[in-house]
C-alpha cells in the first residue's frame, strides 16, 4: 500500500509540473502574439507634404500653363493659387484615371505619383490668388442672382450654398471659385451641362438646367468675387 501511495504522489507531482510548464510557455507566446496586433492597431503617422519638392515639380510640370505662382495669365487655364489642396489632388488623380477627361492634363498627371500630387497641391495652395474682375456689366445682376439665390421656379440651387458667398468654397468638399477666369468657368459649366465632364454628378445636375447666357453670367460674376 505504501508503494502504491508513493507512486500516486509521484504521478501527481509530474502532472502538476507539466501543467506549470505549459502555462509558463503559453504566457510569453501570448504576449508575443499580442505585440504585433497592438503595433498594427497604432494609427499610421500622416506624411507631411514636401513643399520644396512641390515647388520643383510645379515649376517643371505645371507653371507653363498655370503661372509660376499658380496665377494663370491665360483665361483658358485655371488659376490654382489658394485652391483647396484636397480638391487639386482629387482632380489630378481623376485626370490620371480618366474619370475626368482631358488629353492634355492626362499626359501631365500620368507622370505624377500620389506623393507628387500632394506636394504640388499643398505648395500651390499656399500661394495667394490674384483677384479677377467681372467685365460683362449687362450680366452682373443676373450672375449675382443665380450665384446667391439660384432660380427657384426651375429648381436651380444657389452656387453660394456650396462655394460660399465670397467664392472661397469649403475645404476638401467644394472648390474655391473667387477670381477664377470667366472663360475657364464657362468651359467647365458647359462641359458639365453637355456631359463632357462627368466627375461630379451634383455639378452635372445643376449645369443641366442653365442656358448659355446664364452660364456666362455666373462665370463672369465669379471672376469678380473676392
Image: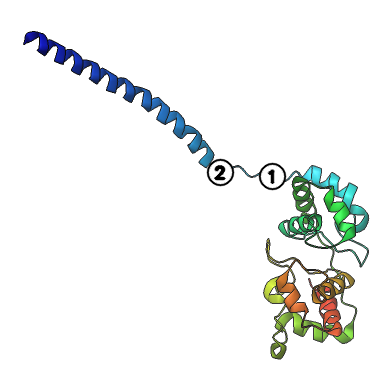
- Of the pair 1 and 86, the residue shown nearer to us: 1
In percent of width and height, residue 75 lies at 92, 67
In the picture, measured across the screen, residue 33 lies left or right of residue 27, that is: right
The image quadrant that residue 223 belongs to is bottom right
The answer to whether residue 163 is above or below residue 16 is below
At 56% from the left and 43% from the top, the residue drawn is: 43
In percent of width and height, residue 226 lies at 78, 71
- Mark 1 surroundings: few (<14), some (14-19) or many (≥20) residues within 10 A: few
At 75% from the left and 74% from the top, the residue drawn is: 204
Q: Give the spatial CA distance, label 1 vs label 2.
A: 15 Å
At 69% from the left and 88% from the top, the residue drawn is: 152
At 89% from the left and 63% from the top, the residue drawn is: 77
Question: Disc 1 vs disc 2: which is toward the camera?
Answer: 2
Farthest bottom residue in view: 153
In percent of width and height, residue 7 lies at 15, 12
In the picture, measured across the screen, residue 181 lies left or right of residue 45, that is: right
Residue identified by numbered label 1: 48
The image quadrant that residue 95 belongs to is bottom right
Residue identified by numbered label 2: 43
- Of the pair 25 and 206, the residue shown nearer to us: 25
In the picture, measured across the screen, residue 187 lies left or right of residue 162, that is: right
Q: Which mark is residue 183?
A: none
Amino acid at each position: 500500500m505504501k508503494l502504491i501511495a508513493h507512486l500516486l504522489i509521484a504521478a501527481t507531482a509530474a502532472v502538476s509540473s507539466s501543467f506549470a510548464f505549459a502555462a509558463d510557455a503559453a504566457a510569453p507566446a501570448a504576449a508575443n502574439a499580442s505585440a504585433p496586433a497592438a503595433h498594427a492597431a497604432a494609427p499610421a503617422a500622416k506624411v507631411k507634404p514636401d513643399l520644396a519638392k512641390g515647388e520643383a515639380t510645379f515649376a517643371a510640370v505645371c507653371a507653363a500653363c498655370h503661372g509660376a505662382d499658380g496665377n494663370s495669365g491665360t483665361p483658358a487655364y485655371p488659376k490654382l493659387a489658394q485652391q483647396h489642396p484636397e480638391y487639386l489632388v482629387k482632380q489630378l488623380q481623376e485626370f490620371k484615371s480618366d474619370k475626368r477627361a482631358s488629353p492634355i492634363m492626362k499626359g501631365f498627371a500620368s507622370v505624377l505619383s500620389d506623393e507628387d500630387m500632394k506636394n504640388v497641391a499643398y505648395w500651390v495652395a499656399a500661394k495667394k490668388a490674384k483677384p479677377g474682375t467681372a467685365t460683362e456689366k449687362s450680366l452682373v445682376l443676373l450672375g449675382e442672382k443665380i450665384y446667391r439665390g439660384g432660380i427657384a421656379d426651375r429648381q436651380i440651387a444657389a452656387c453660394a450654398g456650396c462655394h460660399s458667398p465670397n467664392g472661397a468654397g469649403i475645404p476638401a468638399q467644394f472648390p474655391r471659385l473667387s477670381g477664377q477666369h470667366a472663360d475657364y468657368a464657362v468651359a467647365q459649366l458647359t462641359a458639365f451641362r453637355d456631359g463632357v465632364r462627368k466627375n461630379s454628378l451634383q455639378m452635372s445636375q445643376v449645369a443641366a438646367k442653365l442656358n448659355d447666357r446664364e452660364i456666362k453670367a455666373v462665370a463672369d460674376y465669379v471672376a469678380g468675387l473676392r
